[in-house]
Amino acid sequence: MSGYTPYGGIRGVWHSRATEVLAPGPAGTGKTRGILEKVHLYLLKYHGTRALICRKTRASMTESVLVTFEAKVVRAGCNLNNQSRRTRTGYDYENGSAMVVGGLDNPDRIMSTEYDIIAVFEATECSEDDWEKLTTRLRNGHGPYHQIIADCNPAAPSHWLKRRADRGQMEVHECRHQDNPVLWNRELGQWTEAGNKYLATLQSLTGHRRARLLDGRWSAAEGLVYPEFNPATHVVNAMPPGWEKWPKLRSIDFGYVHPFVCQWWAIDPDSRLYLYREIYHSRRTVADHAASINRHSDGETYVATVTDHDAEDRATLAAHGIQTVAANKDHRTGRDAVHDRLRVQGDGRPRIYFLAGATIETDRELYQAKKPTSTVAEFDCYLYPPGQDGKAPKEEPIKLYDDGLDAMRYAIMHLDAAGRGHGASVITVDDAAAGILATDLETERAWA
């Protein structure tokens, strides 16, 4: 492990043998690398041991955790050549140890074996149920101690991770920017050039994002546009049986500097929406996205593809065989419809769900800039502007971090029938079977 020295909170993680360990801290403190270094050293030191490194979704690891591991951590003793990063399921060690790579969106694979040490990255994405299930897998018995480590940026003070730590169930090692030698020169006692540049980026943040990512505080988001959203309620690890036969819809919000978002929705027999696939990526042309949309849509049919109104971008999609319908962009009515979908109904369920791992590819540039990389991630960032005395006025939300939520609103508005309530869908499974899939032409003309 020459060339790496842990400092601060990560040094505490390295020396800990507690069963449950939490390493919270602002962005850029070196938490991920430090934990990966410990897991790697554990596997090298204790022959025949098994480790799991995971996030809520496997796809989100490709351009984040695995890049750090392969570029900065591994120097010897581990095979990097047997799989590509995108499809990698693990790393084999020369001494018989093994590291499994997984996502909690595919629990059957990672829960079917036992481990000596587990590292969960961006653990605020996970539920406490996910965490407790993982603790039951700490029983491989080949290392001198078993341990599960969580790394995270702070979230709301009510988050289960903080509550679990406050109850004394987790040993906590707070991380700070000064722990990262890339940002802080310990000998000179000052920020490096990279540190000044990185901190300037974080200092440009506002509100709860600044408190969490710069200051490392567990801070609630004030003025959320959709406070009804709860990952424990609305995010599912698997689609219901038979969903492949349900009617489907695509919705698109155009973007280049801001992410381009294409969402694939399935509509269940009770008119609930399920987001089962999405493109969420910046700095690619519409033509590039069109090719990807066609590739991932192979074998499926859709009741419509609803888009933002940009004529040139819609023409580009049409040139690639993707016919579109202009979205109803009435923001206030659309937000009301989203609120109604998110609320838990009398049957104990909401009318919209999001599949964990729906995002096809994590945008590495957005990830490094600490911006949302999926529609689900936008819910915590989409806010009303602050009003007097800290109260949010009743006005339009801040136009930031809303690209996926705009596409979602287009889909809901397209499906919700005028005069039938926001929860009633125009299209049912029976309609689809009968071929009644066209949207009312006069309504479409009014929207265009």
Image (spheres, rainbow, N blue to C red):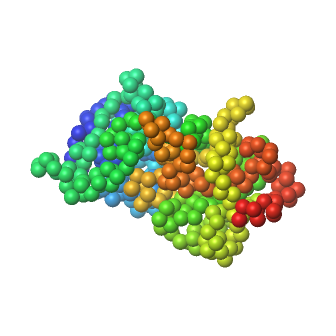
Query: Residue, x 36% and y 57% (percent of image)?
Result: 70
Instruction: Spot the residue most to the bottom.
Output: 319
Residue 436 visible in the displayed image? yes
Tally the marks. Answer: 0
Residue 189: x %, y % from top left:
13, 47
Query: Residue, x 80% and y 46% (percent of image)?
Result: 419
Residue 290: x %, y % from top left:
61, 70
Quarter of the image with the C terminus in it: bottom right
Q: Quadrant of residue 435?
A: bottom right
Relative to 237, residue 284 above or below: below
Instruction: Spot the residue most to the right.
Output: 434
Query: Residue, x 36% and y 33% (percent of image)?
Result: 21
Residue 56: x %, y % from top left:
50, 44
Query: Residue, x 57% and y 71% (percent of image)?
Result: 286
Instruction: Spot the residue most to the front.
Output: 388
Instruction: Spot the residue most to the left.
Output: 188
The residue lying toward the viewer, choosing from 421 and 244, is: 421
Relative to 140, residue 429 above or below: below
The residue lying toward the viewer, choosing from 79 and 155, is: 155
Relative to 201, residue 226 above or below: above
Whether residue 431 sits left or right of residue 401 in the image: it is: right
